[in-house]
């Protein structure tokens, strides 16, 4: 089972920042937080990942709390094309070639 | 930007038939994966593959499934005798190393009639 909890759905206005929360209260010290998204039934698309520090790339920012029990994915200027299901996944570093465990994710709907 | 590709994009087959789904992983990646997603359900891990061997597999990956890297570029998933419940999207993924990010292909939609 997924080790993360996410709200089932969220709305955000186009052009605003979308903040997607994720709880991972049982995360271990060697586990990364990964974010993927899935648009319609396309393949999951990698967004960002982090261990302890906040991370930023061209798609998003990832804010991880100091106790690492929760995180927030931020899409700074959401567009209609960001409407998708967003998955927060906890993955052990060096855990072997194990598969990712997907939960139900958050269905983010960007409103025009 | 390199990406994982999959063929065919759609496949329709009769129950009991064999199907082969094909994937071309990113060229310098060494670890390969198959996942499936039944309509309306979660993405589920099936199997991982490295150095011509299965590394990990889930309970779903039973004897009717097999994987192969027949040449230097392709990675295949074979379903020997398809069942109605095999109807799903099948996603291939690859990573440069087992610790690194997995990148997914666009998927093959399999419909078993």
Image (cartoon, helix red, strand yellow):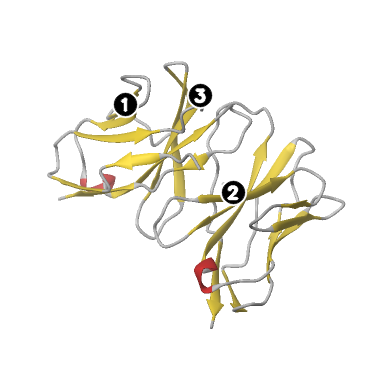
**Which residue is labeled 3 in the image?**
B30
Q: Evaluate if marks 2 and 1 touch, with contact meaning CB atoms under 8 Å apart.
A: no
Give residue B97's position: percent from left, percent from top.
59, 26
Viewed as shown, does residue A27 lie left or right of B104?
A: right
Q: Is residue A88 above or below residue B47?
A: below
* Callout 3 secondary element: loop
Above or below A61: residue B79: above
Residue identifier under label 1:
B66
Which comes sooner in the sequence, label 1 or label 3? 3
Label 1 and label 3: CA atoms lie apart by 18 Å
Q: Is B109 left, or right, of B92 in this rendering?
A: left
Chain bearing tag 2 is: A
Residues at marks 2 and 1, CA–CA distance in whole angstroms: 26 Å
Residue B80, quarter of picture: top left
State whether residue B57 appears in this view: no
Q: The residue marked by circle 3 belongs to what chain?
A: B
Q: Residue A3, how many percent across, how many down?
A: 64, 48
Residue at 74%, 47% (x, y): give it: A26
């Amino acid at each position: 089972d997924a080790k993360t909890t996410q709200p089932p759905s969220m709305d955000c206005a186009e052009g605003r920042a979308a903040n997607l929360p994720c709880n991972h209260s049982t995360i271990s010290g060697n586990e990364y937080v990964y974010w993927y998204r899935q648009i319609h039934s396309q393949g999951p698309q990698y967004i960002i990942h982090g261990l302890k520090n906040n991370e930023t790339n061209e798609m998003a920012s990832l804010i991880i709390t100091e106790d690492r029990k929760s995180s927030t994915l931020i899409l700074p200027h959401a567009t209609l094309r960001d409407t998708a299901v967003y998955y927060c996944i906890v993955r052990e570093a060096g855990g072997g070639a194990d598969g990712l465990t997907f939960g139900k994710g958050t269905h983010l709907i960007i409103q025009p | 930007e390199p990406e994982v590709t999959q063929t065919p994009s759609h496949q329709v087959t009769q129950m009991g038939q064999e199907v082969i789904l094909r994937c071309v992983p990113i060229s310098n990646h060494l670890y390969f994966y198959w996942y499936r997603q039944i309509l309306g359900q979660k993405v589920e891990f099936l199997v991982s593959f490295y150095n011509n061997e299965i590394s990990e597999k889930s309970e779903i990956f039973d004897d009717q499934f097999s994987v192969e890297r027949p040449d230097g570029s392709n990675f295949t998933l074979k379903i020997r005798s398809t069942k109605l419940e095999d109807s799903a999207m099948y996603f291939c993924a690859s990573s440069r190393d087992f610790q690194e990010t997995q990148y997914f292909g666009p998927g093959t939609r399999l419909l078993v009639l």
